[in-house]
Image (cartoon, rainbow, N blue to C red):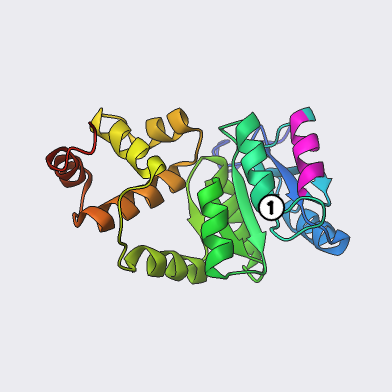
Amino acid sequence: MSGNTHGGDTPGPSPTPIRILIVDDHPVVRDGLRGVLERDPDFTVTGEAGDGAEAVELYERQPADVVLMDLRMPRMGGVEAIKRLLRGDPEARILVLTTYDTDSDVMGALAAGATGYLLKDTPREELTRAVRSASSGQSVLSPAVTGRVLGQVRKPTQGPLSDRELQVLRLIADGATNRQAAAALFISQATVKTHLLHVYEKLGVKDRAAAVSEAHKRHLFE
């Protein structure tokens, strides 16, 4: 066997490719995504589903490292599929890939537990980078979506904390990290962060410690 001029240090393909389940009701879109992803030896597409219900069935039989999920599909849409997938596997990594970027679509998917949210005009390099990030549990948002999320977070919020916001804050007060709170509540870390941002807004504070202190002052844990 001939030698390697780099002494064997040249990085090669991942020994265990990232397994991807593509969920979209358009076969042409699924074919295109498969083509883009399988050009990279670090990825393998293990399944395709035409709607959310089929995605849940396929995932139960063969879990994937990342689920690429469209939102608006027949039978079962993406948001409901995200909830069901996470109910069965709280560690599921679900990356929304859709043409829709309305506030209700974005916030609905993130509240359901999506790991990230991308639009279908995302460049190929950004898509593959996002899949890698999602597979390691990192939150991924396209620039347009980030603006919408920040816009929602920055809106003045009135009223008491919701039950879920109070649950998150109680766990944080007990010393839980975002990861631990997410695991305890069977939601994503991105969703925990969103709840905390809402808590900060409602309590008029800027960080976790101040939120916990303010909650004690208001006797919210009693």
The kind of residue tagged 1 is Gly
Q: Quadrant of the N terminus?
A: top right
Instruction: Say left or right for 72 vs 123.
Output: right
Chief secondary structure of the magenta portion: helix
Instruction: Say left or right for 208 vs 2.
Output: left
Q: Which quadrant of the view contains residue 12? A: top right
Give the magenta range.
52-60
For residue 22: magenta?
A: no
Residue 115 in sight here? no
For label 1, count other residues whose C-alpha is less than 10 Å away and answer few (under 14), some (14-19) or many (20+): many
Disc 1 is placed on an element classified as helix
Q: Position of residue 186 (x, y in %)?
A: 51, 33
Q: Position of residue 30 (x, y in %)?
A: 81, 57
Between 6 and 28, the residue placed more toward the observer is 28
Between 121 and 195, the residue placed more toward the observer is 195
Q: Position of residue 85 (x, y in %)?
A: 66, 37
Instruction: Say left or right for 57 vs 211.
Output: right
Q: Which residue is mark 1?
A: 78
Q: Quadrant of the C terminus?
A: top left
Q: Position of residue 59 (x, y in %)?
A: 74, 35
